[in-house]
Amino acid sequence: MATTEVSPMDQNPTPPKQPSFQQHYPPDFPRKVFAETIATYLLVFVTCGSAAICSVDEHKISRLGASVAGGLIVTVMIYAVGHVSGAHMNPAVTLAFAAVRHFPWKQVPFYGAAQLTGAISASFTLRVLLHPIKHAGTTSPSGSDLQAVIMEIVVTFSMMFITSAVATDTKACRNTDQYQVDQ
């Protein structure tokens, strides 16, 4: 009668190693969440604040100025906190990165909460500072619902395409020393 040998591996199978808490939430994770809160706060404060001021008096800031302010604050926040948190500043960006496995799903709720906290805090600050302004930063409706949906798709695609290209392209220039201003 033939006997089969049992290898030591079969006798004591070790369960697959589960990722530790430290892997999902590294020690600098609270710093990342705080950076997202600040970046989102400043994004909403500058973009909505400049739009609100523009809607009241175009002599203080033009529509072009309000648009440029929005673009500049995004650039500044990417440079300021991009190395800390990734500078998502938008739950859609965080979800997109998680969907393509460039961001851990377990951290998404924390980033989303940080972004909402920053946006709501900035909105409250603008409400306090610009209290007499009515319709602050709002646009009057024009065009059809279909036009609005198409515009949202195009703008969101553009934002996500640029964000993904810059954040995930391994061939992109990672050395930003060439952009530093000499002191």
Image (cartoon, rainbow, N blue to C red):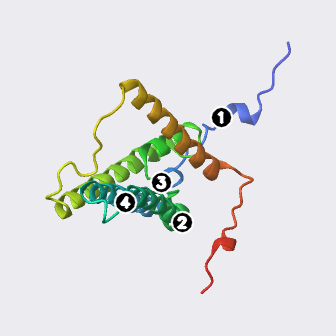
The residue under label 1 is 13
Instruction: Name the residue at the bottom extreme.
Output: 183
Q: Which mark is residue 25?
A: 3
Please give the name of the residue rendered at 76% of the width and 28% of the height, measured from the top-left corner.
Answer: 6
Please give the name of the residue rendered at 36% of the width and 26% of the height, measured from the top-left corner.
Answer: 144
The kind of secondary structure element at disc 2 is helix
- Specify the amino acid type for callout 1: Pro
Sequence-wise, which precedes: disc 2 or disc 3? 3
The residue under label 4 is 62
Camera-nearest label, 3 or 1:
3
Image marks 4 and 2: residues in contact by CB distance under 8 Å: no
- Specify the amino acid type for callout 4: Ser
Q: Residues within 10 Å of mark 1 (few under 14, many from 20)?
A: few
Camera-nearest label, 4 or 1:
4
Sequence-wise, which precedes: disc 4 or disc 2? 4
Spatial CA distance of label 3 from label 1 is 28 Å
Please give the name of the residue rendered at 28% of the width and 50% of the height, measured from the top-left corner.
Answer: 137
- Specify the amino acid type for callout 3: Tyr
Camera-nearest label, 2 or 3:
2
The residue under label 2 is 79
Question: Residue 97 is drawn in which quadrant?
Answer: top right
